[in-house]
Image: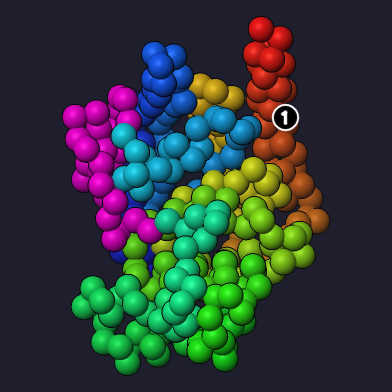
Amino acid sequence: MTTASPKGGSLSIRGVAKVYDPDGAGVIALDDVSFDVGAGEFCVVVGPSGCGKTTLLNAVAGFDTITSGEILLDGALLSAPARQPAPGADRIVVFQNGGLFPWKTVLWNVTCGPVQQGRMTRAAATLQARELLGRVGLQGIEDQYPGELSGGMKRRVEIVRALINEPRILLLDEPFRALDALTKSVVQEYLLELYDLVPKTVFFITHDVEEAVFLADRVVVMTTRPGRVLKIIDVDIERPRSVHVLTSERFLAIENDVRAAIHDEAQKAFEAGERELAR
């Protein structure tokens, strides 16, 4: 497999708001959120708990509606108040809790999408699956079952499965949250290797500031609820990246910038929670 240019994947989020109304409470999850993600860009969204990160990702994925605004992919409307969103093969989500079929082998899990959709022959899908699995250190496990794998191995299989389906945009909702620090570091490097090899637009949600800066081309910092864009920070660190950049002066400066912005919003979220408990 050779490195190629991304085939589309530019995302435009324009004035998006989302209001949940349980029992007439009118909870504003997102308020006038606007930013663009270029084709092939690795965009990471961070913010305090409850700021609407996952709500926004679900809206892009087509799992949730929006109250106002619009979301476009390569200029085509994905979601608007008058348009019911729908998931599509052009957007693939890797969730926190995973989604491998436990009764099927690793190879079947990875190849089932392109084979069943008729985009690849089984032989071609198998060849590509073996190559991608090898790229992330998983050669030789094709005939094993998910229950036989560690958490970090499952995460890598899920990412390979997503990429072999050739989405225009890859959506990741805190995929490494449950991993220990050492495993997370290794899986992050493998993700970046795949990103360099198979360029895709990536929309990544995390609470981890170091992870955000290590992976991203740009970090979007969200405010506490209602979620708005507080700040967009460019990560001008050359690719390919390895863990050695984590101690560089530039990395630490960007990390401190992101951390300071999030700290202020986390403090607001904490104080709001304390006031709510006091009622």
Identify which residue is drawn at 41% across, 62% down. Answer: 200
Mark 1, residue position: 263
Amino acid type, label 1: His
List x then y, in percent, for residue 167: 34, 63
| Residue 188 as seen in the image, left or right of residue 143 | right
Residue extending furthest toward the top: 279
**How was the colour assigned to the protein in this rendering?**
rainbow
Residue interval drawn in magenta: 66-92
Residue toward you, 131 or 38: 131
Say what secondary structure mark 1 lies in. helix
List x then y, in percent, for residue 152: 64, 69
Q: In the displayed structure, would residue 17 be above or below residue 53?
A: above
| Total marks in image | 1
Can residue 182 be seen from the camera position used here? yes
List x then y, in percent, for residue 106: 48, 80
List x then y, in percent, for residue 102: 49, 73
Identify which residue is drawn at 28% across, 80% down. Answer: 115
Residue extending furthest toward the left: 82
Quadrant of the image for the N terminus?
bottom left
Residue 129, picture quadrant: bottom left
Q: Is residue 84 magenta?
A: yes
* Number of other residues with Cα within 10 Å of mark 1, as a class: few under 14, some 14 to 19, many 20 or more: few
Residue toward you, 250 or 49: 49
| Residue 18 as seen in the image, left or right of residue 237 | left
Q: Is residue 138 magenta?
A: no
Q: In the displayed structure, would residue 1 be above or below residue 275?
A: below
| Residue 275 as seen in the image, left or right of residue 198 | right
Residue toward you, 146 or 72: 146
